[in-house]
Image (tube, rainbow, N blue to C red):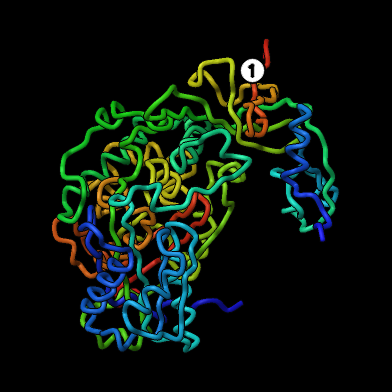
Amino acid sequence: MEGLKRGSAAIVGVAESDLGEVADGISVTDLMAQGAKRALDDCGLSLKDVDGLFSATTQSRLSVLALAEYLGINPPFLGSTIVGGSSFEYHVAHAVGAIALGLCNVAVIAYGSTQRSVGRKQASVREINPYETPFRPFMPSSAYALAASRHMHEFGTTREQLAAVAVAAREWALLNPAAWEKKPLTIEGVLSSRMVSYPFTVRDCCLVTDGGGAIVITSAQRAKSLKKAPAYVLGCGQSVTHANISSMPDLTVTGALAAGKAAYAMARLGPADIDAVELYDAFTINTILFLEDLGFCKKGEGGAFVSGGHIGPNGSLAVNTNGGGLSYCHPGMYGLFLLIEAVRQLRGECGARQVKNCDVALAHGNGGVLSSQATVILGTQSTL
Amino acid sequence: MPGSQDAPLKTYLDHLARGELAYQFSPAAGRAVFYPRMLCPFTGSDRLEWRVSKGLGTVYATTVVHPVEGKPFNVALIDCDEGFRLMSRVEDIAPQEVRIGQRVRLRVHQPGGAEPPQPVFVPVEGA
């Protein structure tokens, strides 16, 4: 198997749609189209250049058709892999492959959600699992809480250490004008908030916002002549370990281990080379698990690693620099925003939250209940 | 024409209705399979034998759900001694008292009405 070629394609345009709480009546396709237009403007391309179209959302059954119709385009290459919040990291890998094969040259990957406006129950169909649903887990929170309980049991991870993840995310969010949360947060504030599914309070859980956006990806050759510095796709990796939490082989080890390994191998880089780390933080335990599984610290040491401000704005490793799903924005499938932030950090567009000398950024998506894991490593021209 | 094979879920629920927790065993893999299905996920073999669990297990992971309305309750993952894991809850003790590593025993809960029976667990006394 030859696989994808390092640096053969680049993300050249990124944009959020409206975020937070969108205007009455706005549809998910409105948000995708708005994101697509802004992302194309960002790189100086237009809809007539688009010959690959990808989308994922929980609110439109045939979303990529709806988007193509809305935009008035007939792109020969379509992709709608939907594996939860990491769908967009999968789309990047699929787009890199399609571009290499000449199946398309300019691909738009779009997302939209109005889950805050319409309510979570309206935004995604509740599936009945006869082996789980009767026990009334509050999903997805309880699945991640079960993983947290196991991590606490095996490694002595504490609620305070989980809370440190939320506090760091909030500190970054305060530097991001687009972030939903605007007030400081303390460890005590996390611990004393309303309990959702032990050990998680509502502050250990991601936000429930509207939002969407798009990215534009093209060949490395085409990328050179566009408006902004390309973010080259250096590495991609994916892994699926289960769909339902009761089938996860080991609740303390995620598919990020295998996904990360594949992405590092393709990129010929390791954790020490990463300048900005964007991890899918649906819950505070995620950040700890992914830092461990992606090799930023040893298994079991994630709790200590995130404490003492080490992953905050003045810490030793820049993690979730936009404020993450915990404090910036979480419309349900957050993975696209990881890529948007990673690209902006590589371009040096991040203002007060800019990571110095940022040449390599890692975006790690998570879908389902720690189920589908996908890593994308991006780099500037200097890393080719 | 009816299908050639009962739904795995039906066989499972029929056992539960008799007060039994059924699981499958894959001779090809030499290990238990749960939830019940038509193919062994370890080997791809379609030869799966039904077995009945002795109903003893150990708490693998636990959480307490705090609903906006109503009392907190336990949700746990239980590792049964036969080598399979399932989602369940531990009853008879406060939900926050459920401990990882705790030994538990099956009790089939009959919710009544149209709801199927549920395999729940209680602490093993003296364990």
Residue B15, relative to residue A341: is it above or below? above
Q: Which residue is mark 1?
A: B123
Q: Is residue A234 visible?
A: no
Image quadrant occupied by the N terminus of chain A: bottom right
Q: Is residue B2 left or right of residue B57?
A: right
Label 1 secondary element: strand
User: Where is residue A6 drawn, in percent x and y?
Assistant: 44, 77
Residue A341, relative to residue A70: is it above or below? above
For the point 45% across and 86% down, which residue is it?
Answer: A76
Image quadrant occupied by the C terminus of chain A: bottom left
User: Where is residue A206 drawn, in percent x and y?
Assistant: 34, 45
User: Where is residue A315 drawn, in percent x and y?
Assistant: 25, 46
User: Where is residue A122 drawn, in percent x and y?
Assistant: 39, 51
For the point 34% across and 48% down, which residue is it?
Answer: A119
Residue B63, relative to residue A173: is it above or below? above
Q: Which of the pair A300/A203 is nearer the observer?
A: A203
Type of the residue with mark 1: Pro
Q: Which of the pair A84/A365 is nearer the observer?
A: A84
